[in-house]
Image (cartoon, grey):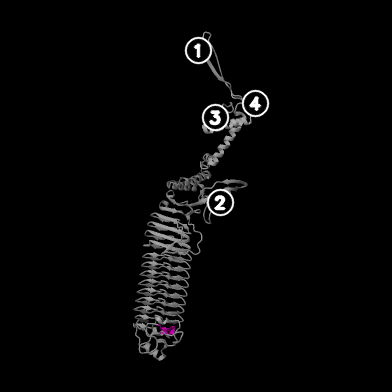
Amino acid sequence: MTSSSSGPSPALIFWPHCGRGADSAAPAGCPGILLPGHSTCLAHLDDADRTAHLAALSPGDDIDLRGTSFTQDLLNELLRALTDPATDRPRLGALLLEGAYFDGGLRFDGADLGGDLRLEGSRVDGDVSIGGVSVGGEISFHEARIDGDVLLGGTETGGDLSFQQARIGGHSLLTKVRTGGDLLFVRTEIGGYLMVGETAADGGAQFYDARIGGPVQFLHTRIGGSAGFAWARVDGHLSFHDTRIGGRAWFTGTVIGGDARFAGMLFERTTKLGPLVCGGTLELSEAVFGTAVTIEAAAKAVRCRRTRWTSTAALRLRYAEVDLSDAVLEYPVGVAAHARPFAAHRSKVPEPGLTDPRVRVVSLRGVDAAHLMLTGTDLTDCLFAGTVHLDQLRLEGHCRMAAAPAGLRRRGLLPVRRTPRRTLAEEHHWRAAHGGHGSGWTSAPRGEEALEPAVLAPVYRQLRKALEEGRDEPGAADFYYGEMEMRRHDPGTPGAERALLAAYWAVSGYGLRPARALGWLGAAMLATVVLLMGFGIPEDSPKQEATGAVPPGGGTVTLTIDKADPRNPTGDGFTGERFEKALNVTLNSVVFRSSGQDLTTTGT
């Protein structure tokens, strides 16, 4: 058997080695360790010597075959030589295979090792399959190069299971693995997916700076310590299903190409989640946070449906569409838009594929808003109906609401001019569904029902109160307008009240449209001027006359002062002089509440 040219470099060969096949391309030759009493490695022994060497081995022996080149047949011969007749399973002490080369793959099943299984720096030309193996120490593939897949099933190790700085060309599948130490994938590169199922690690799980070309799944897994994914890169989805982490979960600088799914997870000790970047949805639905936590994430969507926060929480988000439906907030929780890219350890976290920096809250249904504060979020599409204690919601910064279609719009064949105001998304849905309200209203999303005005009026009322409590009376005015609009359009409102509301709306826009009120005042003044010119101002201002008699002998004179009744004009009443007089009368009446002008009987 010839040695592999892809073994460890000469600088890493620190054991006495075979050296067969040395040339200019491989000056160290075969890196296989020399066997005791022989001048070659196991791979280069002739058949007779190999048979004799293997026959001398006993179950439970420590095996040192560092740098040796294996075929599967040679490995099987070795395991048969170490099989314990009592259990019919290979039994070894420690198995040292650092720098070994496996031609065609590595299959290692049904063996018991009292010590370590060490494959640091090994090269596997194919798949690695380890099943039903019990290792008293650790299993280490540190800096190994594996061209195919890695399959570990039903394996137990008393120490760590390490793939640190390993390169795996295919997929990695760990099922029913139990490790007494840590699960280590630090700076590991995996070309395909990574799946960890029904696995338990008494220690932690570390994926620092790992590069995984496909999705990562944790199914029915228990991690006793902390789980760290700092600066890891996952090109697919990252999902945790029925997985429990006893310590903290670290996701500093993690970049996930697909979704990050933490649905139903219990975060008992995690105080900070992120900053992480998720190209898809950050799924936190039904997750439970057992301590105060800060969540920093840039994602297309963040779902927190039925999420429970048992302590304070701060969500600092970028790009995300946030759904808080039925979330349980036992302590204050803040959702804020983060203006600048996240940074960790003085390095910016990349944000590939994310373009819209707004944070859009789309639903607060079922949330007790008494503990909720929104800062700088976009509420254009937010569904508020069904929110508990909505009047205690705190809105800080610029929280954008849905805008009513402003400007000239068509209502049927008639043009209608609308003034801009902030509205609920639900009002958009109702007006778009019922028609007759002009163009520009947004229809309800698929699966959403357009709510009636009787439901929306209390929502507007509570939001108005929330803004008034925050000393934002100008901002609350639009919600007062919306409340009155819903009352006016509610079929359950009594007819007389609806008529009064319609008049109130037409005259002054519920007291919030001063231009409309001034317009009506101007029209009334113009009509008054016209009427005064026509028959309100007399033809001539009558003069006062004093009449009385002087007693013949002198004495007190009694005078009677009288004035003739004003007479209606008989000629053309629409003259410039009469217009000026009528205008002065009208202005004095409006401004000073007194005109000082005699009017005709009709004019009064």
Residue indicated by mark 1: 556
Mark 1 and mark 2 residues within 8 Å of each other at the beta carbon = no
Farthest top residue in view: 553
Q: Which residues are magenta?
A: 67-76
Amino acid type indicated by mark 1: Thr
Mark 2 closeness class: few <14, some 14–19, many ≥20 residues within 10 Å? many
Give residue 429's position: percent from left, percent from top: 53, 51
The span from disc 1 to disc 2 (Cα, nearest Å) is 84 Å
Residue at x 59% of width, y 34% of height = 527
> Are circles 2 and 3 on residues that touch, CB within 8 Å?
no
Specify which label sits upstream in the sequence, 1 or 4: 1
**Label 4 belongs to which residue?**
570
Measured as percent of width and height from the top left, residue 466 is found at 44, 48
Amino acid type at circle 3 is: Ser
Residue 6, above or below 535: below
Q: Earlier in the sequence, mark 1 or mark 2?
A: 2
Q: SS class of the residue under badge 3?
A: loop
Query: Where's the N terminus, which quadrant?
Result: bottom left
Spatial CA span between label 4 and label 3? 23 Å
Q: Quadrant of residue 113?
A: bottom left
Label at residue 595 = 3
Q: Is residue 593 left or right of residue 96?
A: right
